[in-house]
Amino acid sequence: MKDHDDAHHHYGGESDHQHGEHPRGGGRGSGRFRVQRGDVRIATLLLLAEKPMHGYQLMQAMEERTSGAWRPSPGGIYPLIAQLEDDGLVTTTAAGGRKLVTLTPAGHAHIQELRPTWADPFANADASHGGPDLRGAVHDLHGAGRQIGMIGTLAQQEAAIVVIREARRALYLILAEGQQ
């Protein structure tokens, strides 16, 4: 098995007690909750210590534990599961067309050994929802765009593209104003 820090660099994360912030915050959320590098790994291991889960269940559990502020993408979870399996910390078994992920005895020992050094990956989630619901607004915009794309006329679709591009530009201008 790889040593602790080396394994984290392999997944694109750093040590579990990293001080820097992940640049994107993990996919969904208000933008105030920031996921520390290595937190997807820690969260995955901690959730699997509670019970075996499928990859989708892991993503859902992380979203639930953060009140919707954080949900890792499949592109973050499934390669991580494969790496944890390569490291001997989990096993996967086919169950109902899905792969059930279970901690191995080595995985349990790994958690027991390193848990005292890990920050709680879900700790900052409660404080993250103090501001406006940007996620909801973006979701609503996406839904309207999809509707126009599915049933709108060509002229409506072209007008929608102009509106969306202008909204994008306006959002970047808001950020630029804050940096002056």
Image (cartoon, rainbow, N blue to C red):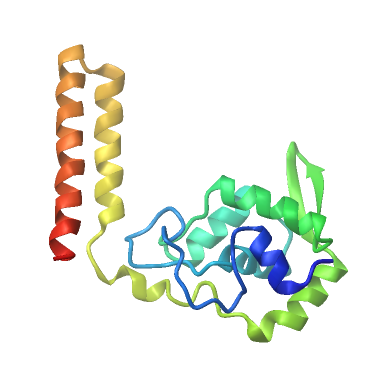
Q: Is residue 84 above or below residue 37?
A: above
Residue 79 position within the rendered picture, expressed as x and y whole percent measured from the top left: 67, 49
Q: Quadrant of residue 179?
A: bottom left
Residue sitting at the far bottom: 116
Q: Please tell me which residue is depicted at 58% across the width and 46% down the height of the picture.
A: 75
Q: Please tell me which residue is depicted at 47% across the width and 73% down the height of the picture.
A: 20
Residue 48 position within the rendered picture, expressed as x and y whole percent measured from the top left: 70, 64
Decide which of 85, 21 is in the foreground and name it: 21
Residue 45 position within the rendered picture, expressed as x and y whole percent measured from the top left: 69, 67
Residue sitting at the far top: 154
Residue 7 position within the rendered picture, expressed as x and y whole percent measured from the top left: 72, 65
**Residue 73 placement, left or right of 176:** right
Decide which of 75, 58 is in the foreground and name it: 75
Decide which of 96, 70 is in the foreground and name it: 70
Image quarter hosting the N terminus: bottom right
Q: Please tell me which residue is depicted at 33% across the width and 67% down the height of the picture.
A: 32
Q: Please tell me which residue is depicted at 67% across the width and 86% down the height of the picture.
A: 116
The answer, for residue 167, to whether it is visible in the render is yes
**Residue 151 placement, left or right of 11:** left
Q: Quadrant of residue 60?
A: bottom right
Image quarter hosting the C terminus: bottom left
The answer, for residue 50, to whether it is visible in the render is no
**Residue 80 placement, left or right of 127:** right
Decide which of 136, 107 is in the foreground and name it: 107
Q: Is residue 95 above or below residue 149?
A: below
